[in-house]
Amino acid sequence: MKLIGLIGGMSWQSSAEYYRLINELVGQKLGGHHSARLLLYSVDFDPIEKAQHEGRWDRLADMLGEAACALQKAGADFLVLCTNTMHKVADTVSQISSLPLVHIVDATAEAIQQAGLRRIGLLGTRFTMEDGFYSARLQERFGIETLIPPERDRADVHRVIYDELCHGQVRQESRELYQAVISRLVAGGAEGVVLGCTEIPLLIGPQDTEVPVVDTTRVHAEAVVTLALGSESGRPQGSSGG
């Protein structure tokens, strides 16, 4: 079993889900008392959140690159960014450490294709929805078209993530707000919805919508376990470059 290097804390609420899912999946695949071999570098999210909203992405890449190098020195075999938004700097982080990185967009694309979808709605932070790095990778590498909500809906989705979900607050009125946003995306032609922030699955699940949803936290964890176990899991080994 390979040693997994997780960069988490963005937020710790979703990083806890990564830890749970990865260990559950390893146990399911190997049986017995097996659990994952992993290292978790959990950052202080406050300076990262501030730098995001200030647009200091070069500084953010350096910060996560430092975490990646620490995991490399500790013996990690590959990297995992436990966040969608920070994949905006995934290429740089992977280059700084030289370790391979399991890319969340690639894991998401595989799940979208397995569901037979070609046009999906994307929910996430304002950066994920608006900055193009996510939708461009889906389109250019996998031919998947992405729809994003209108400005007012994007602002509401972003606010709920940072003001509520990152603090562990799960509110019914926010669930209903997200359901309304999803309904408008579907009315606009989306065949399914990507929960493109690792906190959103704390609020929304398949039971909350009539269209398929892709839980990026779960599909990313599944890709991580597949790579970590390789032939031990009985499945082909694979990862994505940064």
Image (tube, rainbow, N blue to C red):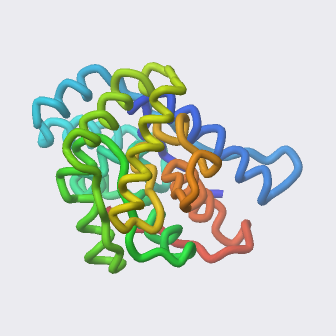
Left or right: residue 148 compared with residue 217: left
- Relative vertical location of residue 161 with respect to residue 204 in this rendering, above or below: above
- Relative vertical location of residue 237 with respect to residue 88 in this rendering, above or below: below
Q: Position of residue 237 (x, y in %)?
A: 58, 73
In this view, the residue in front, 153 or 123, is 153
Q: Position of residue 127 (x, y in %)?
A: 22, 44
- Relative vertical location of residue 174 with respect to residue 112 in this rendering, above or below: above
Q: Position of residue 235 (x, y in %)?
A: 68, 74
Is residue 235 visible to the viewer in this orientation of the structure?
yes
* On-image quarter of the N terminus: bottom right
In this view, the residue in front, 143 or 33, is 143
The image quarter containing residue 229 is bottom right
Is residue 93 visible to the viewer in this orientation of the structure?
no
Name the residue located 14 percent from the left edge and 36 percent from the top edge: 59
Left or right: residue 13 compared with residue 55: right
Name the residue located 30 percent from the left edge and 35 percent from the top edge: 158
Name the residue located 56 percent from the left edge and 41 percent from the top edge: 18
Name the residue located 72 percent from the left edge and 52 percent from the top edge: 26
* On-image quarter of the C terminus: bottom left
The image quarter containing residue 63 is top left
